[in-house]
Image (tube, rainbow, N blue to C red):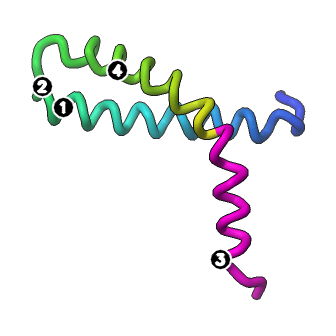
């Protein structure tokens, strides 16, 4: 198991991986359709997107948490 102190990093890794996989898949499909080389093009687009998305999530997540904290009240 992974130590709890790495939870935010692991969360960012999983979130950015899944979201970039989904978005790059949709964008690739919309641009090219289901071409014979769709899978390889999608994976290439996904890896590029993930390289940008992972650090972006790590930088933006704390700001998003603070914004949500300010916009919500405790029940």
Q: CA distance from mark 1 to mark 3?
A: 36 Å
Q: Residue furthest bottom?
A: 75
| Residue 72 position within the rendered picture, expressed as x and y whole percent measured from the top left | 68, 79
Q: Main secondary structure of the magenta part?
A: helix
Residue hosting label 3: 71
* Residue 66: mark: none
Mark positioned earlier in the residue sequence (3 or 4): 4
Q: Indicate which label's residue lies in the foreground, 3 or 2.
A: 3
Mark positioned earlier in the residue sequence (4 or 1): 1
Q: Which residue is pictured at 57% across the width and 40% down the height?
A: 15
Q: Quadrant of the N terminus?
A: top right
User: Relative to 27, does residue 34 appear above or below in the rendering?
Assistant: above
Left or right side of 27 for 16? right
Mark positioned earlier in the residue sequence (4 or 2): 2
User: Relative to 6, does residue 63 appear above or below in the rendering?
Assistant: below
Mark 1 residue crowding within 10 angstroms, few (<14) / some (14–19) / many (20+): some
Residue hosting label 4: 45
Range shown magenta:
58-75
Q: CA distance from mark 4 to mark 1?
A: 11 Å
| Residue 37 position within the rendered picture, expressed as x and y whole percent measured from the top left | 17, 11
* Residue 29: mark: 1
Camera-side residue: 27 or 36?
A: 27
Q: Quadrant of the C terminus?
A: bottom right
């Amino acid at each position: 198991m992974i130590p709890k102190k790495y939870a935010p990093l692991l969360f960012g890794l999983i979130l950015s991986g899944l979201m970039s996989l989904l978005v790059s898949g949709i964008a690739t499909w919309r641009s090219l359709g289901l071409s014979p080389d769709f899978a390889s093009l999608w994976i290439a687009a996904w890896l590029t997107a993930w390289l940008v998305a992972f650090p972006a999530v790590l930088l933006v997540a704390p700001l998003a948490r603070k914004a949500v904290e300010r916009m919500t009240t405790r029940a």
